[in-house]
């Protein structure tokens, strides 16, 4: 029998759309019964792995995200299967990492299928991800209303290791929790707060009057899981977002160290918000960043130029990794130069930044008349942003919002590049006051409620120009228990500490860390004919995407 396994260096260049468009039949990324049941409507007691193409060669076979990943030759009529890959004694069996779930996607029945590509990618890189439908939660979880049931379900998962929650849909698909709060002796309002799904302590309505978030409601106000929302109303919205997220996480648009700063008239004594923004740009952003400043009054700021719509559009089109806006906004206006129609007209793909603002209301995903300007950044298929960190109601600016933004960037540049992690560290840092009248008066409580992340909380923000990882491994194996060694390299040298994941839809998820020699060995049973994915990741690098064929 010929020895036909082939060693490859698994790097490839995906195109933006091809990276997702061909993932048309992913299996369940989820390991737990509710997601699977929600998924296919099967009975609640059905084991998670029995409903999918576990060993379905013809279905799994060749269904990889890109034709280039399928590096093994097809088994023709004259081709022998490869020999088993020998195990050294003492290599322990690899542990399936689908349980416990690290990331949860909550969505409506109509969008379940649309989120499978995103969930599949997360699993492929080692983040076990469960998708659950609101209908399943409504029928199976106790609670006074759907939002409370969703929150309770998140809490149950959080107790076993859940870290990231993606609310997969606009307000009509995943309900917002309305909170009532006050700030600065003048604001008193009720608005949507996704922080309800992040701070999981108590009920947020201790006095049981149906109004959430009051001082009397005992809100603990510190985050317990990282939460973001994809404000999608249609499967096309989900596909738009997934395309840009996968592109952002798998490719390099060259924007990692390019930042844009936008200032405006504060409306207060003719002050330019650059008074606050410029120190952020100069002192908090690393010196290695290329910083473009569009200021209301650029005079006196070296390198700054006038903030106009044309200048913003050109800057986004040229590519920016991070955009920071200190100024005014509304549901209809992303900022005072760019309204919602102009957001819809952006064509800056594939340069998708993270857009961060203290502006008011443009993140109000629950706004009834139409989608807000911030939402449109994520749903415009030709341009916009990969994430929006802003406000679902009034943003308090110097009254609290900019303090949270500064804390967010300090966390981001301080070694916490995942969006939701940086936000939660900022929330903890910022909310150092106890939950009290004091915090309400100062606007801290309001800011904690009102700040909203539109985007994927598990997404790693790129703050360094990335190298592409490479993997070396056998690309063919027969069935039965064997050992597969994977070596990870960066710039030709072995890379210790890289995460290597073997993922087969509906089959297995093994995720191990490369040792000092850049190598790790998996002992496992690959299942029936078909193929599985080999993915290596490391902070601030581009993943290696490869595969193995099973005969
Ligand atoms: Ca909490
Ligand atoms: Ca209450
Ligand atoms: Ca919508
Ligand atoms: Ca909306």
Image (cartoon, rainbow, N blue to C red):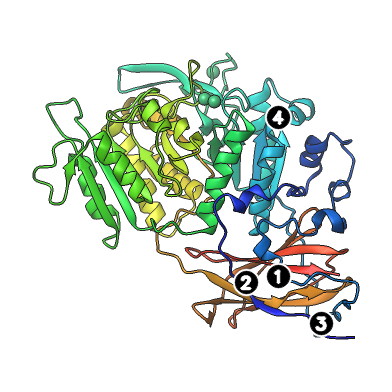
* 27 or 401: nearer the viewer: 27
Taking the spot 80% from the left edge, 41% from the top edge, the residue there is 36
Q: Which residue is mark 2?
A: 10
Q: Which residue is mark 4?
A: 110
Between the C-alphas of marks 1 and 4, the distance is 35 Å
**In the image: residue 446, left or right of residue 74:** left
Q: Position of residue 138 (x, y in %)?
A: 74, 26
In front: label 2 or label 4: 2
Q: Which residue is mark 1?
A: 71
Tell which residue pokes out farthest to the left in this image. Answer: 300
**In the image: residue 87, left or right of residue 71:** right
* 96 or 447: nearer the viewer: 96
Crowdedness of circle 3 by 10 Å Cα count: few (<14), some, many (20+)? some
Q: Earlier in the sequence, mark 1 or mark 4?
A: 1
Task: Please tell me whether residue 454 is drawn above or below residue 125 in the rendered image.
Answer: above
Ligand 1 within 8 Å of disc 3? The answer is no
Dot 1 falls on a residue whose secondary structure is loop
Which quadrant does ligand 3 occupy? top right
Label pair 1/2, CB-CB below 8 angstroms: yes
């Amino acid at each position: 029998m010929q020895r036909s396994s082939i060693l490859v260096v698994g790097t490839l260049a995906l195109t933006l759309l091809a990276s997702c468009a061909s993932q048309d039949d992913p299996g369940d990324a989820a390991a737990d019964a509710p997601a699977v049941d929600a998924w296919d409507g099967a009975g609640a007691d059905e084991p998670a792995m029995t409903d999918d193409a576990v060993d379905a060669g013809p279905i799994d076979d060749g269904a990889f995200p890109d034709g280039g990943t399928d590096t093994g030759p097809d088994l023709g009529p004259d081709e022998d299967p490869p020999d088993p890959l020998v195990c050294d004694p003492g290599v322990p069996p690899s542990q399936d990492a689908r349980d416990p779930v690290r990331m949860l996607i909550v969505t409506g029945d109509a969008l379940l299928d649309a989120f499978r590509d995103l969930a599949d990618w997360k699993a492929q890189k080692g983040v076990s991800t469960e998708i659950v439908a609101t209908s399943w939660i409504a029928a199976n979880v106790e609670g006074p209303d759907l939002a409370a049931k969703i929150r309770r379900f998140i809490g149950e998962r959080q107790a076993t290791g859940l870290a990231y929650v993606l609310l997969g849909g606009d307000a009509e698909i995943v309900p917002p929790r309305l909170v009532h709060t006050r700030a600065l002796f003048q604001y008193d309002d009720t608005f949507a707060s996704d922080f309800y799904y992040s701070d999981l302590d108590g009920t947020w309505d201790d006095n049981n009057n149906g109004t959430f978030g009051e001082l009397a409601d005992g809100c603990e106000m510190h985050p317990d899981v990282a939460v973001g929302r994809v404000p999608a109303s249609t499967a096309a919205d989900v596909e738009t977002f997934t395309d840009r997220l996968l592109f952002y996480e798998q490719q390099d648009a060259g924007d990692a160290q390019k930042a844009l700063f936008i200032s405006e008239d504060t409306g207060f004594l003719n002050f330019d918000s650059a008074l606050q923004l410029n120190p952020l740009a100069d002192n908090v952003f690393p010196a290695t960043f290329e910083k473009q400043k569009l200021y209301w009054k650029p005079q006196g700021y070296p390198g700054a130029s006038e903030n106009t719509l044309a200048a913003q559009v050109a800057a986004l089109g040229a590519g920016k990794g991070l955009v920071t806006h200190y100024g005014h906004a509304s549901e209809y206006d992303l900022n005072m130069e760019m309204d919602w129609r102009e957001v819809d007209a952006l064509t800056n793909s594939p340069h998708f930044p993270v857009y961060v603002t203290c502006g008011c209301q443009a993140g109000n995903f629950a706004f009834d008349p139409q989608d807000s300007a911030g939402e449109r950044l994520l749903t415009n298929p030709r341009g916009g942003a990969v994430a929006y960190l802003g406000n679902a109601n009034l943003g308090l600016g110097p009254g609290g919002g900019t303090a949270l933004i500064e804390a967010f960037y300090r966390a981001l540049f301080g070694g916490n590049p995942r969006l939701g992690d940086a936000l939660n560290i900022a929330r903890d840092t910022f909310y150092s006051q106890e939950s009290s009248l004091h915090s309400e008066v100062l606007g801290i409580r309001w800011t904690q409620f009102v700040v909203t992340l539109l985007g994927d909380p598990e997404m790693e923000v790129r703050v360094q120009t990335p190298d592409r990882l490479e993997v070396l491994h056998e690309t063919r194996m027969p069935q039965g228990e064997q050992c597969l060694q994977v070596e990870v390299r960066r710039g030709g040298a072995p890379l210790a500490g890289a995460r290597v994941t073997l993922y087969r839809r509906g089959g297995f998820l093994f995720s191990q860390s490369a040792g000092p020699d850049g190598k790790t060995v998996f002992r496992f049973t690959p299942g029936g004919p078909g193929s599985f994915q080999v993915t290596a990741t490391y902070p601030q690098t581009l993943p290696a995407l490869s595969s193995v064929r099973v005969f």
